[in-house]
Image (cartoon, rainbow, N blue to C red):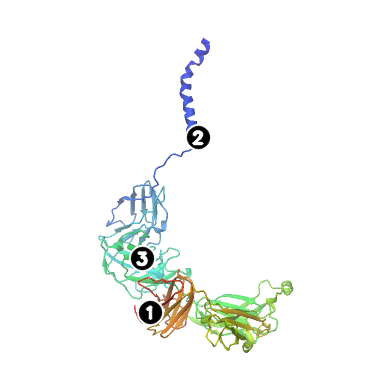
Amino acid sequence: MKKFISKYFPIIPVCMVLIPVMFTHSSCANTTEAPSGGPKDTIAPVITKISPKNGAINVPTVGARISFTFDEYVVVKNPKNIFLSPPQAKSPKYKIKGKTVEIYFEEPLDSNTTYTMEFTDALADNNEGNMFPGFTYVFSTGEHIDSMMVTGVVQDCNTLKPIKGATVMLYRNPADSAIFNERPVAATKTDDWGFFCIRNIRDDAYRMYALKDGNSNNIYDPSEHELIGFIDSLIRPKTKLNDSLPELQKYEMKDTVNCLARKTEYEVNIFREKPTTQMIMNKVRVSDRTSYITFLAPNAHVDSMWIKGVQPDRLITQFNIQRDSLEIWVNDRKRMPDTLHLFVNYRKTDTLGLLKPETEHVKLYVEGKGKKASRSSRRDLKHEDTICVYTLKADPTTVEQYGYQLEFKYPIINEKFDSLVFRSVSPKQKDAVLKYEVERDSMNLRCYTIRPKEKFLPGYEYFLKLPNRAFRDINGFYSDSTEVKVSLPTDDKLSTLKMNMTGVNNKYIVDLLDEKKEKTIRSFIIDSDCVLVFPYITAGKYAIRITEDINRNSIVDTGSLLEHRQPEKVKFFKIKDESLIEILENSEMEHSVNLSELFKN
């Protein structure tokens, strides 16, 4: 026993210490209550030090480094939002050292130039991701800091919605070609409200452009389909910088009151410019007798065209309204070859950028067609492959304005419109045959509008019947019979909006849009004072968009930078500065708008 005690006695104190620790650890590991980490950090990072200081002068043009130290660790979320003005070919680079972000440049800065560097939506704290609200740092490579500024808003030319992230640029070179070849002398990005403020610029004359810069090179690239906008004349800044100006403050974008209170000197409407280089871009053989070709630019001028082996009078052609797509049909019953050889003599852009007549050989072929495919296709023929295909539609809410819409898949070569039967059934079930009129669409030779000569009446049912074999298309197929019924809506929850249009001294396109201003519900084209009626409207919010159709072609035309032509002017009817009209159930609303007053500015 003495021997045992003398051998193990030294480890007894150690065991007395370790055993309680082991049980304590086990108890902690099995606890059901997680340790508290304190309240979540919701505070954005704060700059505590800048070197060199904001407003520094004589900053070296080569090797300049600018350090921003924060009160916590930060990360760069969006490097592209570290925006330097005037911009360089390469964006500013950065390094993070502890709580400091160091900015440096890969190419020399310009001498005697005032620079601004913006950090909007660029930085966030490392832990919770709280975004740094933004800051504008100013420095100069010369002896002084420029002190003028200009403000404005960038918006979509059709919806007038603000464009976020557009680059607004100033050029001292007055030539429009500058934006294709040079970088601006000053620039900035628009915020969520489309607002911009180009600050710390010299008192000088400038050209102003707005660009939705897809590749972030600060140069306009039409081939990239970038959106562009411009101010017609040279501008000169009128406002001198003052730290108290609301236009210079960094607001939370949800602060509607302060964001909208900022004054804007310029309004830039951006658009997607149509290509100016003319050439045949695409070709498609839709079926044996149907093809189309598309042109790169609108307003294509075709002098003549023919298909090898087809008589000229057997061709039926139709341009779309922009004249950049041409449909071609062969009105010939004989079997068509697998490849049609089309020859188009048109005005094509040459190497000098001039339009010159040129004849182009276009091969139109049906893909995958061969002997096996032909036999298989004959076995797989469906009913619609052996008839004159058409659609006949009538929408109860728009039938008064648009009538019945009849559209054929192929041009028709024989028609019997006088065989149609248009009749009405009164609420007392009295049947009457109505006289009707047929109008061919001026822009679509396959589409017709059919409407009764009498006014549509509520409570009546209207039937339009197309009898069997009334039409024959270029394939030699006859039409089936059909009958379409329509009645004016009787829902007492529907409402009517009337617009008294006065001061109409031009041609205008008036559209009723949905609340998001994306869908066109009704459309009118007017050129004189009138009352427009929008019946059968469900309760909700709507917008009235009015476009001044300067060239009177009944479409909304975009602008052209090269031609120095703005997109056609768009205005929204407003009530107390609100562009949305709220329409209640079962109501009749009436408003007046003087278009001369609306478009005078």
Among the 4 quarters of the image, the one containing residue 345: bottom right
**54, 63: nearer the viewer:** 54
Which residue is under mark 3? 195
- Callouts 2 and 1 close, C-beta under 8 Å: no
Q: Amino acid at mark 3?
A: Phe
Q: Amino acid at mark 2?
A: Asn
Q: Secondary structure at mark 3?
A: strand
Gap between marks 3 and 2 measured at Cα: 57 Å
Which residue is under mark 2? 30
Which residue is under mark 1? 593
Among the 4 quarters of the image, the one containing residue 474: bottom right
The quadrant of the picture occupied by the C terminus is bottom left
Please tell me which of labels 2 and 1 falls first in the chain: 2
Residue 428: x and y in percent read: 58, 82
- Callouts 1 and 3 close, C-beta under 8 Å: no
- 40 over 293 or under it: above or below: above
**149, 9: nearer the viewer:** 9
Residue at x 71%, y 74% (from the top left corner): 381
Q: Secondary structure at mark 2?
A: loop
Please tell me which of labels 1 and 3 falls first in the chain: 3
Residue 535: x and y in percent read: 48, 77
